[in-house]
Image (cartoon, coloured by chain):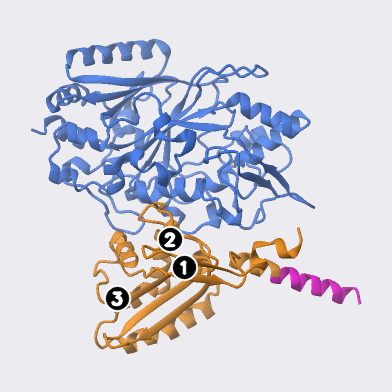
Amino acid sequence: MLDLDNIQHILLTRTPAMTGRYEFLSFDNPSAGRAWLSELVDKAQSAADVRRTMDSSDRWVTLAFTWNGLRALGVPDDSLATFPDEFREGMVARADILGDTGSNHPDNWVGGLADDDLHAIAILFARDDAEHRRCTAVHADLIARCPGVRTLSYLDLNATPPFNYAHDHFGFRDRLSQPVIEGSGEDPTPGSGGPLKAGEFILGYPDEEGSIANLPQPEELSRNGSYMAYRRLQEHVGLFRSYLAEHADTPEAQELLAAKFMGRWRSGAPLVLAPEHDDPELGADPMRNNDFNYKEMDPFGYAVPLGSHARRLNPRDTAVNMNRRRMIRRGATYGEALPEGADDDGVDRGIAAFIICASLVRQFEFAQNVWINDRNFHELGNERDPICGTQDGTLEYKIPKRPIRKVLKGLPAFTTLTGGAYFFLPGLNGLRYLARTP
Amino acid sequence: MSVSEYQWSKPAAMAIPAEGYIELQRGRYGPVFPRTPACYGFSIIAKVKPGREAAIREYGKVIEGAIAATPDLLAPLRLHYLRWVLFDVGGGLHFQYQGIFDTDFDKYTEDAIKLFTQSGVTTVFTNLEGFPEDWQTNPDAFIKFVREHQCPSFLEYGEYPYVTADEIKKALRLKAAFSDMLDQMQ
């Protein structure tokens, strides 16, 4: 049984937020941090709470901490030592493993996220702009009342138009392929596989191997918690559009090329099911838009190139052990949309996402190190993920096509990582423990 | 490009420093061992527990039967060859597990361990000294055992360097297809 009253809602629910802010915080001393946390413990909603109040709530709060943040809150050394190595080291120290090199390197990150004094994140999602302004003002008041708590930086989020479905700045529909947790009450959509054991995502529950693994001590702190990898990915929309225009003659051919990079049309329609023409109705239909495989339906990648983003991040039946590699994605877009047809305006825009899993090294780092950045994924030789892989202009992208495949040489980086961190997302029991740890 | 310009057409050797790599590249669980002219690979050498020789030899038949029943059982490991050797040069009986494959082991460690478990390879390790008793619930301890017992090569050679098993199979399939085509034209 999932302890829905103690699991932070972000793990299990999507809220109808259209706007929000991430506040990145630092604690100069443990008592300051605990004073801040004590006032917010009751504001961070559980999964059960959010489900009960979804229609009547206008704001949703999530709190999480880096390993340095747990230490800054006064968590004892013997407890800190029980957290897994990769979380203790932090995302910055793991940059070479993750492929965060070159312009993606932490030296170039913004907002102080690469600094050791990044301790916590407060995720403040709001239904509308008025509520956004109210929440951020209330939080600013709280910070002012807690000397020793500093805001390192913040990032304002906003949905991008058109607002009737979630998509990124490149225009690709988002939230299409999410794992479902057993016991959450949700049913997986066709093609999404069965529900997964809670321990793949939530600490203190049996995982797909049947064991309760990696439980840091004390259990009161770790149970119902999870880990979040934060990734702020700047999207170079102008560059992406001009690349498409330079490499495809007609608007239709440009849409197809964009789809070949992603593995789906911008509408969300999967190329496996709609290989030649977009099918927006299919893209919008959750009962059909994830119902396909690769091994039988597209083994050579004639529909979905072997190295495409969707195929790397979810190889489906062409990888083993998939149930141990799944992750929950949450987050939002930031920055103003670049109008269609407009020249690149230099504005910072992109996605700021959380990848949630019970084991950063087995799930997130595997996806990053192998699926996204392995140059030889599916024997491709010299490719990385065309959307979010580490690209330095020396790699290529192959699009299988009869009679002869198309090879795009010198692929540019369409995205740049400008921030990131590993957070521990405590259960409400963990938040209460942290608020009172002496 | 003429045939002589392809990398595979020119035999190559690589000397490897004692630490097992030329340039430190961190993987998720430790240094990445390099791809050499003889592909990726490992040589895991560990001492056999007293009286377990027959049990280990028996696994030869077990794995033979498993592959016969399910030929693609080990496909995810992207292997070229496996060689299992028992030897005693005076310090007691030792077991060597040597594999040559096309992917960095560290990248797919968890998948490999899961596969070892499914295919019964893991249980042969329980006859080795130092193998973690709790291997079924402690994959990290298994990974540690493998890394601690890996003896890196100091020289590797390839007559047709850097060619993957998939490429070899593709070439043989192509040859078979051509031969079939020629038959059809008679």
Name the residue located 41 percent from the left edge and 58 percent from the top edge.
B106
Are discs 3 and 2 located on one and the same chain?
Answer: yes
Are discs 1 and 2 located on one and the same chain?
Answer: yes
**Residue carrying label 2:** B33
Crowd around label 3: few <14 · some 14–19 · many ≥20 (10 Å): some
Q: Rounded to the nearest whole Å, what is the CA distance between mark 3 and mark 2?
A: 25 Å
Number of marks in picture? 3
Q: Amino acid at mark 3?
A: Thr
Question: Is residue A307 toward the left or the right of residue B30 in the image?
Answer: right
Element type at marker 1?
strand
Name the residue located 60 percent from the left edge and 73 percent from the top edge.
B159
Q: Tell me if residue B148 is in the magenta stretch.
A: no
Name the residue located 59 percent from the left edge and 52 percent from the top edge.
A293
Apparent colour of chain A:
blue
Q: Tell me if residue B177 is in the magenta stretch.
A: yes
- With respect to residue A225, does B42 lie above or below? below
Query: Residues at badges 1 and 2 in contact (C-beta under 8 Å)?
Result: yes
Are discs 3 and 1 located on one and the same chain?
Answer: yes
Give the chain ID for the orange colour: B
The chief SS type of the magenta part is: helix
Q: Which mark is residue B41?
A: 1
Question: Is residue A303 toward the left or the right of residue A128 in the image?
Answer: right
The residue nearer to you, when weighing A357 against B37, is: B37
**Residue carrying label 3:** B126
* Mark 1 or mark 2, earlier in chain: 2
* Mark 3 or mark 1, earlier in chain: 1
Q: Which residues are magenta?
A: B172-186
